[in-house]
Structures are given as structure tokens and as C-alpha cells.
Image: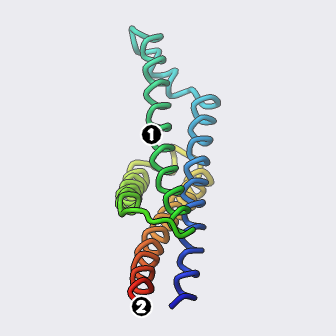
Amino acid sequence: MQRNLRRYQNLLSISGWAVIAFCIWNILKQVIYILLIPDELNEIKATSMYETEYEIFAYIFAFVILFLDLGLRLYIGLSARAESNGKKKGMGYVIIAMISATVLGISLIMGIISTSILDDSLVNIIVTLIVDVTSIFAFIELFVSAFNVKSLSKKLAEE
């Protein structure tokens, strides 16, 4: 039982780092997209009477969402790391991880449905699909490992 606990603690630690790493990748991807591919934003600005106000609002909104995502994923990842090192953590980060995985899965499905191959290159679609599916698996591994660590720790404490 102790061996299984160590194994799940290790998986929980790795999953925590994976959640953080995928978040950092997502932020970098979005920043690069905003800075290097402003065509969509320019099209919207060209039809808007309030070009400057819209641009400022759009950038602020995008960065607020990105930093909220970063905060949540840092909380999830760091909590998983702490629990893998033996610190007691509640179920909050596990519940947020479940919700995040569900939201990511729904957005992935909606992205697949709304994207046609003509709109984006096939390579971009495949890379995004691989990264998002891997991120979802990191979340799944995190909450499976967290449940196992919690249950095995409880059993070992009772002995």
C-alpha cells in the first residue's frame, strides 16, 4: 500500500507540473497570436467607430482571462504538488481541476465543430488538438491521482 501511495504521489506531482506547463504554453500561444496575427482584430476595428476603445478593451479582457486561467491552474498545480509531498489539501483544487477539464473538453469540441479546415491550416488544427487533449489527460490524471493519494493516505493513517 505504501508503494502505491508513493506511485500516486509521484503521478500527482507530475500532473501538477503538467497543468502548470500547459497553462504557460496556452498563455504564450495567445500572446503570440495577439501580437503576430492581428488580422481578425484589424478587421473588427475597421468596422468599428470606436477603434481605439475597442482595441484597449479587447486586450485588457484577453489578458484578464489569461491571468485568471493562470491563477486557477497555478492553484491546481501547486496544490497537487503540495499534496504529493505529504501536505494535507482539501478537495477544492480537485473540483476546480474537474471543472477546468470539462470546460476545456467542451471548448475543444466546440472548436472542432466551428472550425473548418479551410479557415485554418491542418497543421495548426492537429497541433492544437494534440496539446488540448494532452492537457485534458493531465487534468484527468491529476484528479485520479489525488483521489488515490487521499484514500491511500487515509487507509495508512487508520492502520
Please provide percent x and percent y for residue 25.
61, 48
Q: Quadrant of residue 17?
A: bottom right
Quickly name the residue at label 1: 68
- What residue appears at the point 53 percent right and 78 percent down from the top-left corner? 8
Q: Assess disc 2: are there few (<14), some (14-19) or many (≥20) residues with their C-alpha within 10 Å of its C-alpha.
A: few
Q: Earlier in the sequence, mark 1 or mark 2?
A: 1
Can residue 109 be seen from the camera position used here? no
Is 5 above or below relative to 83? below
Q: Amino acid at mark 1?
A: Leu
Residue 158 is situated, as x and y percent measured from the top left of the image, at 38, 86
Q: Position of residue 53 (x, y in %)?
A: 43, 12
Of residue 63 and residue 14, the one placed in the foreground of this image is: 14
Judging from the image, what secondary structure is the residue with disc 2 in? loop
Please give left or right for residue 130 compared with residue 159 in the image. Answer: right
Characterize the local packing of mark 1: few (<14), some (14-19) or many (20 or more) Cα atoms within 10 angstroms.
few
Q: Quadrant of the C terminus?
A: bottom left
Colour treatment of the image: rainbow
Q: Residue at x 60, y 47 (%)?
A: 24
Q: Is residue 63 above or below residue 151?
A: above
Q: Quadrant of residue 104?
A: bottom left
- Distance from the alpha carbon under mark 1 to that under mark 2: 41 Å
Q: Residue type at mark 2?
A: Glu
In-front residue for pair 7/63: 7
Task: Give the number of the disc on residue 159.
Answer: 2
Position of residue 53 relative to residue 132, above or below, is above
Q: Position of residue 144 (x, y in %)?
A: 43, 74
Q: At x 53% / y 62%, what residue is drawn?
A: 82
Q: Secondary structure at mark 1?
A: helix
Residue 134 horizontal side relative to residue 150, left or right? right
Judge left or right: residue 152 versus residue 18.
left
Q: Is residue 118 left or right of residue 10?
A: left
